[in-house]
Image: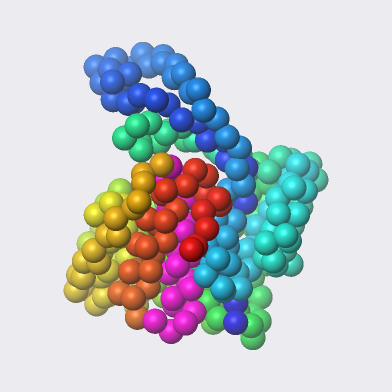
Amino acid sequence: MAALICGSLAFDTIMHFEGRFKEQILAEQLHILNVSFLVPRLQRDFGGCAGNIAYSMKLLGAEPLPMATLGNDGASYLQRLQDLGISTAHIKTIDDTFTAQAMIMTDLDNNQITAFHPGAMMQAHALHVEKHPDIRLGIISPDGRDAMLSHAQQMADAGIPFVFDPGQGLPMFDGQELRHFIELATWVTVNDYEGKMLSDRTGWSSAEISSHVKGLIVTLGAQGCEVWQQGHQHVVDPVKAQAVVDPTGCGDAWRGALLFGLEQGWDLLKCAELGNRLGAIKIASRGPQNYQLT
């Protein structure tokens, strides 16, 4: 059985600022912000939510099916997926644009500033979700706005249970649209910041959101995560990382573990425990797709 992963494929340029943003940005001068950060270390990685989640699932022995778009510069990414044994059957190349690009700067406190060029991701709505006996579940992760709306509806129409993972795409939607996503979804996952925004926009508390789905998971970084089911909260303890090197892609590693567990028929608490372990392993490596399971 397989999991359909709707989301982005992107090239990540990761820059490491050897200071703290809070010491460089003056709160009282935000209206005339003009800052520059020296980044001695820079690397380019394969990224994007769909690619990162697929990588995590493949490490765990699952069969991910990323559904996404690449640009005319995406041949190397396509080859990488094939080398990893990840299906590219649902990936479309858009010839007149670039692959999505994320420029991510991380400081010593693991705060991040990201600039994102969507490129081919904005054409992802050209892809269509269809019912298939091998697809057991799916996820709607950050993608083009039209793609997220259409793919969620198509998954629901096809009877595919799915995780709604709005991520950094959450601000694109108003309260009515977000409530509709939740009503279509089977599970919802957000980080703590996104969870607050989701509640603010929908007017629903975490307990209320969980009453519309089988479960709401709120990840809390180094503090573990909350699992909400039918209005009841459970806290899942964190796993201590051997080293804190780079948070890029930790949330996607966590979501890959979630999908793996759901595909195995695990309960949400067990899924969350595995997610916390994967996040702790990932944060000890630079880049979103360079960690290994030992």
Residue 178 appears in view:
no
Residue at 42% x, 61% y is 278
Toward the front, the furthest residue is 294
Nearest the eye: 287 or 93: 287
**Mark count:** 0
Residue 210 sits in which quadrant? bottom left
Horizontal placement of 211 versus 246: left or right?
left
Estimate the x, y position of residue 65 in percent, counting from the top left. 63, 68
Residue 205 appears at what percent x and percent y? 22, 62
Going by the image, does 110 lie left or right of 46? left
State whether residue 56 is above or below residue 102: below
- The residue sitting at 55% across, 66% down in the picture is 59
Q: Where is residue 80? Give x, y as percent.
A: 71, 54
SS assignment for the magenta stretch, majority: helix
Q: Can residue 276 be seen in this view?
A: yes
Q: Residue 190 lies in what quarter of the image?
A: bottom left
Write the start and end of the magenta stretch as one range: 246-266
Residue at (44, 53) in percent of width and height: 282
- Magenta residue check for 251: yes
Q: Is residue 288 above or below residue 26?
A: below
Q: Is residue 124 left or right of residue 200?
A: right
